[in-house]
Amino acid sequence: MTDDLQKRIQAALANPQNMGEMANADSVGTVGNADCGEMLRLWVKFKEQNGKRVIDRATFQSFGCETAIAVASLATELIRGKTAEEALALKTEELAGELGPLPPMKIHCAQLVEGALRSALEPQKPAAKIEAPGAPGTPAWIAPGACKDGWFGVVRMPPRSVDGS
C-alpha cells in the first residue's frame, strides 16, 4: 500500500463519519467473512424529497481493517440524498470515494461495504430461518441468493432495538 493511500485512510479514520447504530432505521444490511473475521453492518433511513424516497442518513459498525472503516465512512456520506437505485448503481471503486483506487489486496474492504449496502437496499426476498453456525438454537436470517461473488456471505439480521430485543 502506498504512503499516500495510507495517509488518506488515516485522515478518514481521524474523523470517521456516521459510525454507530441507528435507532428506527428503515433498513439494515449485514455482511461478514468468517475466515478473516471482518463484519460490517449498515443502517439506512429514508425520507421523501421531491416525490422520491431518498437516503436521509446511513450509519455503520465495522469489525474489520482500517480500510473497510474508512470506505464505510466515505460511502455513508456518498449515498446521502440518493435513491436506493442510485446508491446500488455505485461501483465498488466509487464507494471508496476520496481514498482513490485501492490496491488489489484492499479491494475486498470496499466489497464488504458494497455487500452491506446491497443487503440493506436490494428488494427483499423471503428470508429462510436457519441456525447460526456455532450457536445452536440461535436464529440467523439468510437472504437466499444474496451472495454475489462467493467472497463473503450476506447475512440479513432483523433490526434490533438498543436493549437487544
Image (tube, rainbow, N blue to C red):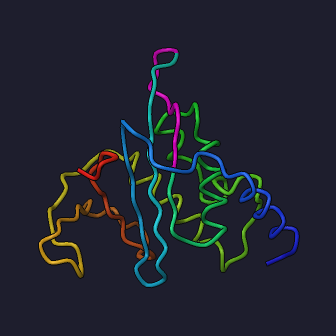
Location of residue 36 in the rendering, given as x and y in whole percent from the top left corner: 49, 82
Which quadrant holds residue 45? top left
Task: From the top left corner, tell me how far across and down residue 66 is, in percent.
Answer: 66, 69
- Up-down relation of residue 92 to residue 66 (above or below): above
Residue located 60% across and 59% down the image? 92
Q: Give coordinates of residue 134: x percent, y percent.
A: 23, 82
Where is 149 relative to 94, above or below? below
Please report the residue visible at 29 percent of the width from the left and 64 percent of the height from the top. 145
Magenta span of residues: 50-59
Number of numbered tags placed on the structure image: 0
29 with respect to 156 (left or right): right
Say whether residue 136 is magenta: no
158 left or right, relative to 72: left
Magenta: main secondary structure:
strand
Q: Is residue 58 magenta?
A: yes
Q: Is residue 25 above or below residue 63?
A: above
Q: Residue at x 24, y 79 (%)?
A: 133
- The residue most toward the right is 4
Left or right: residue 133 versus residue 40 is left
Return the residue found at the far left: 137
At which x and y percent is residue 143?
A: 26, 59
**Extreme residue toward the bottom, this view:** 35
